[in-house]
Amino acid sequence: MLAPADVTACILAGGRARRMAGATKPLLVIDGATILDRQRAVLAPRAREVIVAVARAGSGVAPDLREVVDAVADAGPLAGIVAALAAIDTPWLLAVAGDMPTLAPAVLDLARAAARDDVDAVAARLGGWPEPLCALWHRRALAPLAARLAAGDYKVAAALTALPVAWLDEATVRAVDPTLACFANVNRPADLPR
């Protein structure tokens, strides 16, 4: 299993949240804590550092965290992943969407255990689809991801599937997270827990 010293965690917080009236999703409060604080509590023990990828410098999302600015404006999560990979000094980046309030420690530990020298990413494949916004990325993935970004191909799932990946199958993930709550995100007000 990857040691925390080998991992930098990044919360991807550069989205415009159009379906949430422009709300800063990591700062939404769920059960008395912001999504950001909930994520930090899970990520901090598993990484040397937690950073935040934002659309613009000085975003104010997390003033006490190191901030990296999306590599290309309005290019989606891939821009944040590329910016984070360019900024880290650890071999691995654990990138998570800033709107996932229920990160499961056991799922993140599965990913850390599956990391190998012969892959550039570790991610779950659920229902046949890759889950790129809660995934580990090796620093050597920076060049191919940056090339896709420069070419205007912003689809992070397509970028993931073009790399050598250690896939976590759905049965393995469900063994530690039966409802797949780790991958739930808040895209619209109806997604907020009541």
Image: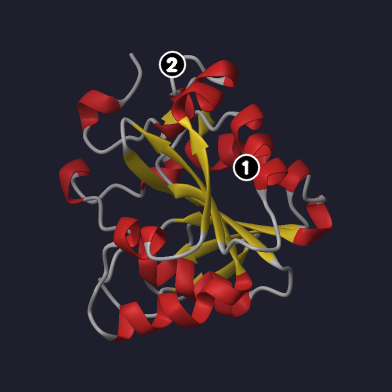
Q: How many marks?
A: 2
Quarter holding residue 8:
bottom right
Amino acid type of the residue that numbered disc 1 sits on in the rendered structure: Ala
Is residue 62 in sight in this rendering? no
70 displayed left or right of 143: left
Question: The C terminus appears in which quarter of the rendering?
Answer: top left
**Residue at image x 32%, y 35%?**
186
Amino acid type of the residue that numbered disc 2 sits on in the rendered structure: Thr
Q: Real-space Cα distance between discs 1 and 2?
A: 17 Å
State whether residue 16 is above or below residue 192.
below
17 displayed left or right of 42: left
Q: Bin the neighbour count of mark 1 within 10 Å (Cα to Cα): few under 14, some 14-19, many 20 and up.
A: many
Residue 106: x %, y % from top left: 65, 28
Label 1: which residue?
A: 111
Q: Check residue 179 in the rendering and tell me which mark sits there, or answer none.
A: 2
Which is more N-terminal, label 2 or label 1? 1
For this rendering, which residue is in front, 32 or 69? 69
**Residue at image x 57%, y 39%?**
39
For this rendering, which residue is in front, 117 or 82? 117
Quarter holding residue 76:
bottom left
Classify mark 2: helix, strand or loop.
Answer: loop
38 displayed left or right of 7: left
Residue 191: x %, y % from top left: 27, 26
